[in-house]
Image (tube, rainbow, N blue to C red):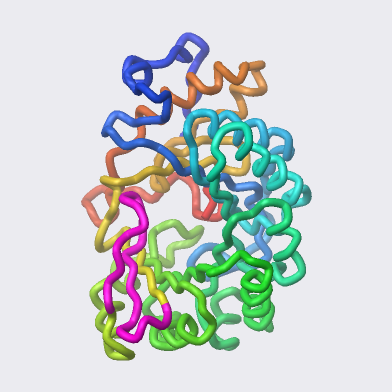
Amino acid sequence: MLSILEPEQLAPSAAADAEPDGRLRDSHNRTITDLRLSVTDRCNYRCVYCRTGEDGTQYSELPIADYARILRVFVSLGIEKIRLTGGEPLLRQGLLDLIRETAQLRSDFVPSLDIALTTNGHLLAPLARPLREAGLSRITVSMDAVDSETFARITRVPGSFERVRDGIRAAQDAGLGPVKVNCVLMRGFNDSQIEAFAEFSRNEGVIVRFIEFMPLEEGRTWAPETVIPMDEIVARLNAVRPLVELPPNHLSETARRFTFDDGRGEIGIIAPVSRPFCGHCSRVRLTSDGKVRTCLFSQSDHDLVGLMQRGASDDDMRSWIRRVVERKEARHHIGEPGFLKPSRSMVHIGG
């Protein structure tokens, strides 16, 4: 479902006017500081927890200049962290130009603006240093196994594991470390990898983050029994070496952080299914075709690019964004009676 706010709805709301520093705030008193922007919904992998494996998809991308304008407007509203996603963002022509333009916003608005990118790592090795030189702060690599056979079975791309591993090492060498490595755990697919990932974190100097499988796939793979909950992950990691919990870096951090008793390695566990963290959510999303989503599990989109195409000024866009963000959902409803999957799959929302 698509939501379009008409011009008469563009005026800032009373709640927006009441925010003394002009930052984005929703009706649940959460300040919005993080924007996840998808620059493409194309991907060179067909991961079993995301894609059906079939081709024929119609892809959507905006011109780089449109993304740059949108980012400037959001940063002017107090966004402090930008994550570029996809699809696979390294497939997007003009990505380095977009990062350079985004990095310029540090001098105009937020000197500490954090610019991150999530990638499957397949194309990362030769691009790691140019990404850093363009102004990228840090990088996250999606990697769902640490052996080539399991990895190829999940991605449906033979011979891909070594390329991703080399990309991680290149990112570290380029100064984008410590690299975060995200693993979506699925019972019966890659749950055998938990202990191996612990060793990978300790040996490679990366932060491994296990993510509970969420109902965001194109097909019908998700079921409650495929989710490996946080307590089970912690118990298995404790069998490798005793875990020590680390304090959160900030209140809205999605991962519970751990290290091992000897201080080597770091593990994060993101548990939106068994341990939701909606109460501290600070994020909104922009899809590759210019739609704002206020929650990963939203049932509707808000058409920002349509507003732009109708000639909206930057001030119009700011007022419109405030109204949309004010209506941000209180929480998701996974596991509750009547839960509906979001109106788009993850690859079309932005990871």
Residue 31 quadrant: top left
What secondary structure prevails in the magenta region?
loop
Task: Give percent across and percent down for residue 201.
Answer: 47, 80
Query: Is residue 316 a member of the stretch shown in magenta?
Result: no
Span of residues in magenta: 244-265
Residue 253 on the magenta segment? yes
- On the image, the x and y values in percent for residue 121 come to 64, 69
On the image, the x and y values in percent for residue 260 come to: 33, 82
> What residue is drawn where x is 39% and y is 87%?
195
Q: In the image, what residue occupies the spot 54% across and 40% down?
A: 286
Q: Residue at x 62, y 79 (%)?
A: 165
x, y percent for residue 324: 43, 27
Q: Residue at x 47, y 60 (%)?
A: 217
Q: Is residue 316 left or right of residue 188?
A: right
Instruction: Relative to 323, say whether 91 is above or below.
Output: below
Q: Is residue 208 above or below residue 64?
A: below
